[in-house]
Amino acid sequence: MTIVGAGRMARSLATRALAGEYAVRIVDRSPQKAADLADQLRSAAPAGAAPDVRGSDALAVEGADLVVLAVPYPAGLAVAAEYGAALAGSVLVDICNPVDFATLDGMAVPAGTSAAERIAAEAAPGVPVVKAFNTCFAGPLLGGRVAGQPLDVLIAGDDAGARQRVAAFAAAGGLNPLDVGPLRRARELEALGFLHMASQERLGLNWSSAVKFLT
């Protein structure tokens, strides 16, 4: 899999991917940041393990099973448009919460749409977009569990096969995938992600909580 971005969510997703024995390529505007994160992931691996992870350039998206947009909105729009047909055969995974960071009190997309749907409109024809991981914070995702329970990963997309590929990745990394249906469900997932973010200070949760469903 290829992860676009080298921040905290990229680190956590790469950790889950390596736990599931996925090869990981990290792409960032700063090649040094991508290389540094890959080095840190190798250093954090258990003794005797040889994780397949390295920084790469944009060519890493070609032929990748999953390409994860671990970048804030609206950067994912530009990435989807820039990579274009190079994403053929890949599932493009959008993890962002399009929050208005100027106010932290609303969404940066109009009602009746979602960041994921806008990214899908920018992607090349035939490239499936899946919304996932936006309800997971980086800290809990790094370990994969909260209070002894695996994190739930809510997955939305119009292509059933693409949703299944993302679900398989989540399960391999020790998480609990939940298929919630078509890509338009990303509207509710992004609203849930925003609510989860907005509740942290008020409830004193310190970004260590997780959205959990009774399943």
Image (cartoon, rainbow, N blue to C red):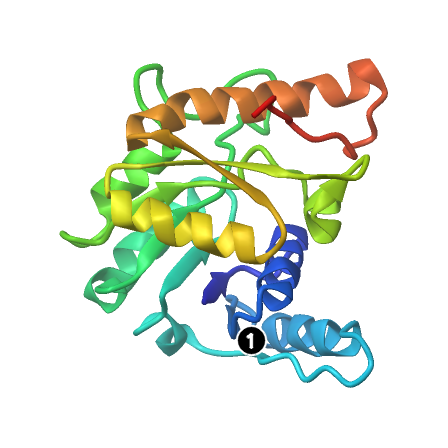
x and y, in percent, of residue 179 in the image: 41, 34
Residue indicated by mark 1 = 31
What residue appears at the point 37 percent right and 54 percent down from the top-left corner? 165
Secondary structure of the residue carrying numbered label 1: helix
Residue type, mark 1 in image: Pro
**Up-down relation of residue 57 to residue 73 (above or below):** below
Query: Is there any visible trace of residue 25 in the rendered image?
Result: yes
Quadrant of the snapshot with the C terminus:
top right
Specify the quadrant of the image occupied by residue 44: bottom right
The structure residue drawn at horizontal position 54% and vertical position 59%, both measured from the top left corner, is 5
Residue 104 seen from this side: no
Image quadrant occupied by the N terminus: bottom left
Q: Position of residue 134 (x, y in %)?
A: 53, 37
Residue placed at 59% from the left, 26% from the top?
Answer: 102
Position of 37 with respect to 67 (left or right) is: right
Residue ID at (35%, 19%) = 110
Q: Nearer the viewer, residue 127 or 52?
A: 52
In the displayed orientation, state which residue is furthest to the front. Answer: 215
Figure quadrant of residue 47: bottom right
**Vertical relation: 153 (above or below) 141:** above
Q: Is 174 displayed left or right of 165 in the figure?
A: right
| Residue 138 placement (x, y as % from top left) | 68, 45
The image position of residue 184, as x and y in percent, is 30, 26
Q: Is residue 91 above or below residue 145?
A: below
Q: Label 1 crowding class (10 Å Cα cut-off): few <14, some 14-19, many 20+?
A: some
Residue farthest left in this picture: 125
